[in-house]
Image (tube, rainbow, N blue to C red):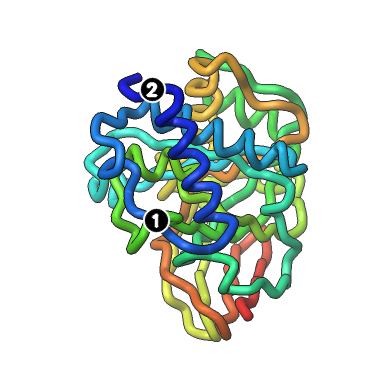
Amino acid sequence: MTLTAAERAAAARMLRRAEHHGTPVGPPSELLPGLDLADAYAIQRTTIALRLKDGASVVGHKVGLTSPAMQQLLGVDEPDFGHLLDDMVHRDGSTLLAARYCAPRIEPEICFRLARPLSGPDITVADVLAATEAVAPALEIVDSRIRDWRITLVDTVADNAGSAGLVRGPWTPLADVPDLAAVDVDLVIDGERVAHGHGGEVLGHPAAAVAWLANTLAAFGTGLERGQMVLPGAMTTAPFVSAGQRVEARFGVLGPVSVTFA
């Protein structure tokens, strides 16, 4: 780490205020020269601790930067991760206020629910599939509390990997979905298909992203717990969304999930 504890705490408070008020701020990497990845994850953990102090609880994690296009955009060769909190989870068909976010985007993903814990460092795709109880169609709302999405890797990591919400459909037992990499999805906004993708877009297999997460969390002295959810990464591009729009992700075997922004 290159920052002082006071600098990391100040950055966490700044991002928490931006999230709470829906008012973006400048990039932490510009405000705090020398900010490195270890600092960024420390800031993220502090921000989450502030959320927990306000009454939220951790229900899982999200993995980001799992597609080659996004990794190339930020000049990285591996994903990042953030936390999912209970007050970020919404039911299928929910109507959410667009104004609660700074500049939201939407991503269709396959959500995992774990039947038993996963702790790295040597977790494999097979381990993930053996530990997964069910999967569900999901839409992740990603948002940048950093003005104009002017981010580097350390900025998005500090900002909880851009995670802002999860709209989840019904669970399907994993045994009924034989090949997650082959699951297709159409992303539809206001009745128009804007993107198409499949599970293989996510590190070759969505479970590979969950394995990466479990192995990465081991370096932080933690792991994935029974009952937790994991979002492994986007299956398509992530378009911006705004008030008045209805978004639906139509997954083949998993069915649809939708959200409306008011």
Residue drawn at x 45%, y 23% is 5
Vertical order, 59 against 163 (above or below) = above
The residue tagged with tag 1: helix, strand or loop?
Answer: loop
Is there a contact, CB below 8 Å, between mark 1 and mark 2? Answer: no
What amino acid does circle 2 point to?
Thr
Q: Residue at x 60, y 37 (%)?
A: 48
Residue 87, image x, y percentages: 72, 52
Residue found at x 63% / y 48%? 111
Up/down of 118 relative to 75, above or below: above
| Residue 91, placed above or below residue 204 | below
Specify the amino acid type for callout 1: Val
Give the residue at mark 1: 25
Residue named by callout 2: 4
Q: Quadrant of the N terminus?
A: top left
User: In the rendering, at what x and y percent does residue 52 appear?
Assistant: 70, 38
230, 206: nearer the viewer: 230
Quarter of the figure with residue 25: bottom left
Residue 69 appears in view: yes
Q: Is residue 187 above or below residue 244?
A: above
Q: CA distance from mark 1 to mark 2?
A: 20 Å
